[in-house]
Image (tube, rainbow, N blue to C red):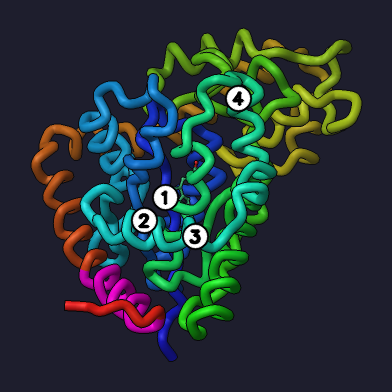
Amino acid sequence: MAKETALSGIRPTGELHLGNYFGALRQWVSIQEKYDCHFMVADLHSLTTLETTKNIKEKTLELAGLWLASGLNPKKSTIFLQSAIPEHGELGSIFSTLLPVSMLELNPTYKEMVSENPKAGSFGIMNYPVLQAADILIYKASRVPIGKDQDPHIEITREIARRFNRRFGNIFPEPRSMFDEVPKIYSLSSPQKKMSKSHGPDSYIALLDSPDKIRRKIKSSVTDSGSEIKYDELNKPAISHLLDIFYLVSDKSAKELEKKYKNSGYAEFKKDLAEAIIKHLTPIQKKYAEISKNPKAIEKILKDGSERARAVAQKTTREVKSKIGLLDF
Ligand code: TRP
């Protein structure tokens, strides 16, 4: 039986952190055999935030290098660059006619960006999920391995697929997201927010942070009142979220960890947590140091992957044109 197709992407907007790693990347590595996987550096999507367009080429190679260092294998998966496939934009512009603007205005990521910066709401930001739908549907991916925060975009993708299929003929699957059963990773400085680059460098652990930086960030991470190490998301969110990270990097359950640190204070717990994170990241960092010596080789992997991806994208675009009834030559 043919494998199902999966597609996912990350924007090259800065440092990759533990939230990206456990929420997406580690999961990608594990599904490479089971699915026909496509992993995309979403460089066009990163243009929606102006400050992130700096050094975009370097960030693209760094991101792809980290993917490889974490275990993505170009022999198994198609690893490619969004901007190298012009058909994404072409399909995106066809898709942009299928939804009312009022629906895109309800998209939570759009609302959040506009509320933070009312005058900066570009058309590209509003169109973000439409381009994302093109990214996914152009490969007819039925699975999107990505964190829950992307659910609204996947829902818009499904709506676009349904509308296209109804109007022009059934060619697209209605993709579903997929998550590991992994706990969400939260910010080290504000435990009610998810870990994100946008809350400042002390709020996250980057995959390339040095051991000393990791020790310092964990040491200064926010804790709850009382010194007990206990998993209690409601009353002790900060410690619970640190326990989640500890579990992910060490495979020791919260119960085991609670027992182990029953009589110790936060300081000892944090010290061990930092060391467990360092131990987990060291092999990835070592591999990355090796891979990043040769950026041309990373570029070649992206280029080869993009050629493969483009052949599929062109095929779908021809099919779309024929379904719509456009002349195609
Ligand atoms: N919006 C995704 C993010 O911010 C990135 C992305 C772009 C993506 N296109 C995609 C994810 C297609 C999955 C599928 O992380």
Q: Would residue 219 be found to the left or right of residue 13 on screen? A: right
**Depicted 258 relative to depicted 70: above or below:** above
Where is mark 1, residue-wise?
Answer: 9
| Res. 243 mark | none
Residue bounds of the magenta highlight: 311-323
**Depicted 246 relative to depicted 86: above or below:** above
Of the two numbered discs 1 and 2 on the same chain, state the one appearing first in sequence: 1
Whether pointer 4 and pointer 2 mark residues with C-beta atoms closer than 8 Å, the reply is: no
- Name which residue type carries label 1: Gly
Locate residue 272, reporting x and y percent: 60, 22
Which of labels 4 and 3 is toward the front?
A: 3
Main SS of the magenta segment? helix
Q: Is mark 1 within 8 Å of ligand 1?
A: yes
Magenta stretch containing residue 321, yes or no?
Answer: yes
Whether pointer 1 and pointer 2 mark residues with C-beta atoms closer than 8 Å, the reply is: yes
Q: Would residue 252 be found to the left or right of residue 299 on screen? A: right
| Res. 97 mark | 3
Inter-mark Cα distance, 3 to 1? 24 Å
Locate residue 282, reporting x and y percent: 38, 32
